[in-house]
Amino acid sequence: MANSKFEYVKQFEQPDQLLPNTWVVVRIDGRGFTKFSSKYQFEKPNDKRALDLMNAAARAVMTELPDITIAYGVSDEYSFVFHKTCTLFERRASKLVSTIVSTFTAYYVHLWSTYFTDSPLSPPLPSFDGRAVCYPSVQNLRDYMSWRQVDCHINNLYNTTFWALIQLGGIDATEAEKSLKGTFSADKNEILFSKFSINYNNEPEIFKKGSVVFRDYEPVEPGTHNVAHEVENLAEPATQSKSQSEKDKKRRAKAAIVVEHLDIIKDEFWDRRPWLLSNKPGKIPKEP
Ligand SMILES: Nc1nc2c(ncn2[C@@H]2O[C@H](COP(=O)(O)OP(=O)(O)OP(=O)(O)O)[C@@H](O)[C@H]2O)c(=O)[nH]1
Ligand SMILES: [Mg+2]
Ligand SMILES: [Mg+2]
C-alpha cells in the first residue's frame, strides 16, 4: 500500500524503551490528594477506607497485568515492579506507565463506593501521575522498596504524633508543628506514650508499614526443607518443557494475590518468598 504524504509525521515519535535487563518500577501518585482527602473528609492522619481502596485498585492492576511481580503502597502512592526480564509492550516506558495509571485510576473510581459508602464521587475526580525508573540490581530494587517503607514509617510516626497533639492534646497545628521541630523518633514515641498513653508499636500495621501486594504460594519456613532450592533448580525457560511452563503460567494466573503489611526491609520477607526476585521469571515453587 502506498504511503500517504502525511505519513512522514511518524518520524517525530521518539523511542522510549527502558533499559533491558533492569527491574522496572512504575510509581503512581495521587494528584492533589491534600485537597482531595480534605474534600472527602479522610480521617487524619490515616483513613482506613482510603488505604483499603488504594490496595483494592492495586490488586486489580496486578490481576490484569500478570507481569507485575510485587507492588508496595503508602498514602496516595503505589509502586509496581516488573521483573527484569519482562518484555511487556517492548518495555516502552509510556505504554507501561500510561497503562498502569489508567487501569489503577479506573479501578479507584469503580471501587470508590464500596469503600466510601456515604460520599459519592463528584468532579474534580481523582487522578494519578506516574513515572518509570529502572534499577539495575536486586540490591538497588530492594533499597528502593526500603526507601519507600522507611518514608512510610517516618511520615506515619510524625503524623500520628502531630494529630495526637491536636486531637487529644487540644493544641493547634502551628503549636504542634513547633513542638515537633527538631525531635527524633525516640522523642515522638515518648510524647505519644507519656502524654497520650499511646504505644506506637501497637498502632495498626497497615499504617506503620504500608501495604505489599504479591502472588502467594506456600511461604518457605526459614531453615526447613526448601522450596527456594526447588525454585533455583527449575529449568531455565529455554530448556523448560512447554507443558511445564504452561502449567506454571496457569498456576501463576490462579495464585492468590495477597495484600500484607510486612517488613520488606529485612531479608526475611524475601528469603521466605524466593519466587519474587528469582532470576527465573515466573518460576514458582513446586506443588507439594
Ligand atoms: N487525612 C488523610 N490524608 C491523606 C491520607 N492519605 C493521603 N492523604 C493526603 O494526601 C497527601 C499526599 O501527599 P502528596 O502526594 O505529597 O501531595 P498531593 O497533595 O497529592 O500533591 P501531588 O502529589 O504533588 O499532586 C498527604 O499529604 C495527605 O494530605 C489519609 O489516609 N488521610
Ligand atoms: Mg499526591
Ligand atoms: Mg504522595
Image (cartoon, rainbow, N blue to C red):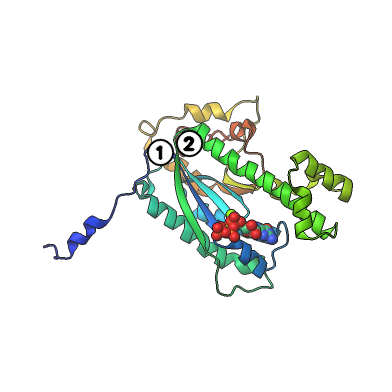
Where residue 135 appears, as percent x and y from the top left, is 46, 38
Residue 8 located left or right of residue 185: left
Q: Which residue is mark 1?
A: 85
The reply to whether the residue tagged 1 has its Cβ within 8 angstroms of ligand 3 is no
Residue at 39 percent across and 36 percent down: it is 21
Residue 46 lies, in percent from the top left, at 71, 56
Q: Nearer the viewer, residue 61 or 222?
A: 61
Q: Quadrant of ligand 3?
A: bottom right
Per the image, the residue denoted by label 2 is 283
Disc number lying in front (1 or 2): 1
Give amino acid for label 2: Lys
Q: Is residue 114 left or right of residue 62?
A: right
Residue closest to the eye, 91 or 67: 91
Picture layout, residue 50 above or below residue 160: below
Is residue 32 shown above or below 207? below
Which label's residue is closer to the chain start, 1 or 2? 1
Contact (Cβ within 8 Å) of mark 1 with mark 2: no
Q: Taking 239 as reference, is 268 left or right?
A: right
